[in-house]
Amino acid sequence: MPGPKDLDPSTSPRALLGAELRHARENAGLSQRELGEPLFVSASFIGQLEAGTRRMQPDVARRIDEILGTNGFFERNCLAANKSRYPDHFAEAAEAEAVATTIREYAPLLIPGLLQTEAYARAVFRAYQPTATEAVVDELVEARLERARLLDDPTTPMLWTVLDEAVLRRRVGSAAIMAEALGHIGALARRNRVIVQVMPFQAGAHASLNGALRLMSFMDAPPLAYLEVMRMGQLEDDPSTIARYALTFDLVVAGALSPCESLALVASVAEDYAHEDQQP
């Protein structure tokens, strides 16, 4: 049975840094809000640093050392804590995803990374980087498959995904790759490991027409939203912004097909791809 997803201070540099920050802040007699004020960040941001769901950047670490009188400890250690195998624009989101208890997302164009098969991921990365060496693509695919192992745990995180119908219809790689990819999604849904809905073309305009959306909730830290466009990503933690995005997701869910209807559509499109692949 897979081990717990919680960050362990004895093995995770980022968790250790967060634990040390909480200890140093409390020793200084400061609340999360009081530490955040001179850093121009929210109390929830400090809480996320302490919980290990946000990265501590060098400039923030330097100011924390000044405020808490920690003699450069956080600046010295934040670089080691920030090492990641993921692209810079996505690394912090991937790290937060690894400790999330709930992930809700709307995917308008591609099968989300956690649901991708190896062949589908390889086709995506080859399209992103058509001149990259096989070694580079292999490394990217390996990192993506490592992310997907989150779903080896039978219950956590709870993953609820709404796929636009375009995700099913857009051929990434060959018909065989698409049949396998959609079959994988269907298998996860039938095992009750993920909740999958499809936003059909016939639904017309909906609340998230302008892009993808991912919401993450945590056991001991405030929720986060992640937005990504053209290899640029941004994490949001402002409560009013999170509430607005949560409403957007709720509206998307309301306009999508039911899980049962969605699974039937995914299976039907997968079967069409499989028949196409068998044509001489």
Image: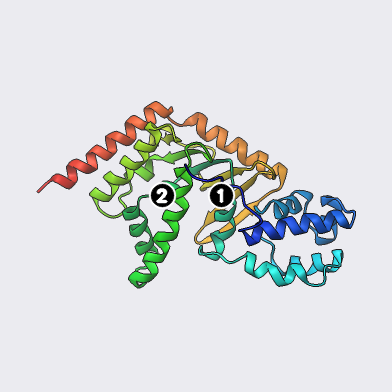
Q: Which corner quadrant of the image does residue 12 belong to? A: bottom right
Q: Is residue 12 above or below residue 70?
A: above
Q: Secondary structure at mark 2?
A: loop
Front-most of 96 and 176?
Answer: 96
Question: Image check: 126 left or right of 245?
Answer: left
**Taking 73 as reference, is 30 left or right?**
right
Q: Which residue is mark 2?
A: 110
Residue 264's place in the image compared with 62, above or below, is above
Q: Which percent across, then down, holds residue 139?
A: 41, 65
Q: How is the image coloured?
A: rainbow
Question: What residue would you read off at disc 1?
Answer: 97
Depth check: give the residue in front, 122 or 247. Answer: 122
Residue positioned most to the left: 280
Residue at image point 52% right, 42% down: 105
Give the x, y percent position of residue 73.
Answer: 76, 69
Mark 1 nearby-residue class (10 Å; few <14, some 14–19, many ≥20): many
For image coordinates 34% across by 59% down, the residue present is 122
* Kind of residue indicated by mark 2: Leu
